[in-house]
Image (cartoon, grey):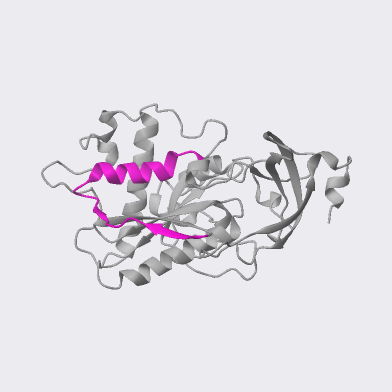
Amino acid sequence: MVSSQYYDPANRKWRYQDLSTQKWYDLPQQSKKESTFYASLVYLCEAIGEAYRSQNHKAGVETEKFESKWVMSPNNAPKSTEETASLILPDVFLLCGMDGDANKWKQKFDKLQKDETKFIKAITAWWLKIVTVIEINPKDDKDILDHIVKLMSYLRQVLLEQLDRWFVPGLLFTGTQLAVWVADRSGALGTHKSFNIHEDPKKFIQVILGCSILSPQRLGFDPTMKLWRGPSLEPVHSFCQEIKHEDYSGSIYKRQWVMEMPAKGNSDERELFLTTKALSVGKAGCMQGRATVIWAARKLADLRPGGADTVS
């Protein structure tokens, strides 16, 4: 539960201006340039999460570490393990931390003399670790459809690279209005009407906080899939902080997963399967139709010691 005090607009951690203006502090009011919104929107999203944590609320993730950071990277495409990945440029996104990232972020922040703008630009982003994306269009004009298409292209790329995602949330920000979208491999849904973040600050807080602290499953991660790291290491969820870049193979076709499935003849029991290779991932980024991803797999219990590394 989130206390009512948490939503108090007088809370300076919200970077909320005085009650007479009814405006979020630092957000441009008249600018039509996207770039003027990047840093202030990131700071605001981070402040919302920090205010929640400072009030000693229980973390949204209880069983896994889930370090995350709102960042902007409008001039640098997120990195990909796929050589043919599209070089599209999302404006602002929530990045899930990997092994030691929390400490690395702090060290980098201190090294840059606590300059938040330089720090946010210096973080290396991977499509594999993006949780959600914000597309910015401050003009609030009839070209909104073009920005929806751009947002869908970002969410599609996340689905293409993160095969353990059920769905990906995305936000469309038009200067004062915010719309919420969700894309999965069968299609996309968006709010019928956007809302004004200045007139309805509580709703804005709820949306950003939800993206920041909800459990991975509620943000679209499949809890029945874990990344296989070889027989000597335990498989882990892709959002777990223990993950390292070396744990991912160079190709999504070769990347191996441990999947939990209902046991044959008894749906109350579960069996573990190890994928040997992906047979078809061409539809992984599709958002229309069945968009089926197909793997070759075998029961994990049938593997002999040392055999897992030689599966092909």
Q: Is 281 placed above or below 46 here?
A: below
- Nearest the camera: 119 or 142? 142
Write down the quadrant of residue 16 in the picture: top left
Is residue 235 in sight in this rendering? no
Quadrant housing the C terminus: bottom right
Q: Does the segment drawn in magenta span residue 146?
A: no
Question: Which residue occupies 52% across, 42% down?
Answer: 217
The stretch in magenta equals 186-215
Closer to us: 117 or 177: 177
- In percent of width and height, residue 215 lies at 49, 38
Q: Is residue 213 above or below residue 290?
A: above
**In-image side of 196 versus 93 (left or right):** left
Residue 201 magenta-highlighted: yes
View extreme (left): residue: 20
Residue found 34% across the figure and 30% down from its top: 2
Q: Position of residue 20 (x, y in %)?
A: 10, 44
Q: Name the residue at the front extreme.
A: 265
Q: Left of 262 or right of it: where is 121?
A: left
Which residue is drawn at the image coordinates 48% and 63% (left, top)? Answer: 154
Q: Quadrant of the N terminus?
A: top left
Q: Position of residue 153 (x, y in %)?
A: 47, 66
In this picture, residue 205 sits left or right of residue 157:
left
- On the rendered structure, is 137 left or right of 296? left
The quadrant in which residue 258 appears is top right
Inspect this view and state whether residue 101 appears: yes
Q: How many marks?
A: 0
Q: Nearer the viewer, residue 286 or 100?
A: 286
For the point 44% across and 28% down, the residue is 58
